[in-house]
Image (cartoon, rainbow, N blue to C red):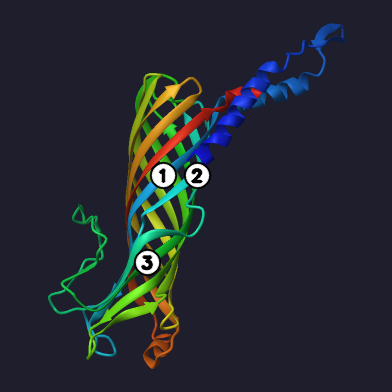
Amino acid sequence: MLKIFLPFLLFSIASNIHSQEIPKKEPRLGVQNGKVAEIGSSPEAKIGFWKGFWSRSSATVLAGENGGQHIFESGTKYPNLSGAEAGSRITYSREFSYGGIELRHWWQKWELTAGYRTNGRNTRVGQGRDEDFAMANFSVERGNKFSFREWSFYDTPYTFSGTKNFADGRGRLKMKQDRISLTLRRYLGDSDPDGRKEGKGLFLSAGIHYTYFKYYLYDVNQWIASNPIFYGPIGIGLSFSNSTWEIPVGIGYRYSDGAWLFEGSFMGSTWFSHFRDYHYQRNLNFIGNAAGYGIETNLGGGRIWNSWLFFLRLTENRLYGAGSFRTAGGISTSDILSNSAGSYRNYLSTKQYNIEFSITNYLEWISK
């Protein structure tokens, strides 16, 4: 964390010292049309614009810990062309550290924030699991986690229950993720986008997030209910790449007394994903799309010292949806024939949280 924060702090301190050493120039006066006027007023007007811009801007560096799961499921409890009633579930751990930056600008009651977060490179993120299971008449397929008709919500990433595994593989995971966010807020009441100002009240929030991540499942040990039973290492299992667009909209509340800042928010979202799931042992691709709904909650608090804000935030995020995929490639006859069998239904679910610590510097010192 020091490698992230130290260069930013040194740059800020040096810039403040340098700005104080620059002497202010007296305005040059001249006569224009018989009146005394300042020479070079246009550059001064431009400086005035940028002074106002930086006085309403801030920069943030942050570090966080993420946890949770991302799950890919497919299957049917009704016999397919081969007579099988079966499904598959792949579970990816979401436990990783990350860092990032945010740039924020506000005007009156409006605030615009652009952010970037990344774990930097492929890192170990725990364990992955690839299950194949059989289903029966009593098996349950609950794909709709949001039931707007019944006003109910099932907060579980699993779609199928009442199943029995006939194959189960477990292995190590490594993953790289990049996330870009753009958020717009409108503050109401006494609340203000400048957290150093005293006030409290609601705010409206909307935005768009783009996330891309790619997993590798390797050092896999697999169990198969064959005759005789097989259990042993199979090497690398699969790779999974996923790109997601989220559009969250919601409401929040902010309180500030000039020294302490607290805020929380609740947002609902719609999202769309494109994915590619490649199984190395079968040389088979699952390529498809999914879409659905989600919720996001935030709760945080921080301390303000002069032009600095030190903030700690907890975020809970849920994305549940469904889609379809097609197969490409394969080694066995059944895998190759599946390429021309049309599309298959699938479910994507992400249930995760993150704890994030950030340091924000208000940038009015740039124009001094």
The residue tagged 1 is 64
Q: Please give left or right for residue 343 compared with residue 211 in the image.
A: left
Element under label 2? strand
Q: What type is the residue that disc 2 sits on? A: Gly
Foreground disc of the pair 2, 3:
3
Residue 160 visible: yes
Element under label 3? strand
Q: What type is the residue that disc 3 sits on? A: Arg
**Cβ atoms at labels 1 and 3 below 8 Å apart:** no
Instruction: Assess disc 2: are there few (<14), some (14-19) or many (≥20) residues with their C-alpha within 10 Å of its C-alpha.
Output: many
**Residue at the image position 18 percent from the left and 55 percent from the top:** 150
Instruction: Assess disc 1: are there few (<14), some (14-19) or many (≥20) residues with their C-alpha within 10 Å of its C-alpha.
Output: many
The residue tagged 2 is 100
Instruction: Assess disc 3: are there few (<14), some (14-19) or many (≥20) residues with their C-alpha within 10 Å of its C-alpha.
Output: many
**Residue at the image position 39 percent from the left and 41 percent from the top:** 356
The residue tagged 3 is 172
Q: Nearer the viewer, residue 277 or 225?
A: 225
Q: What type is the residue that disc 1 sits on? A: Gly
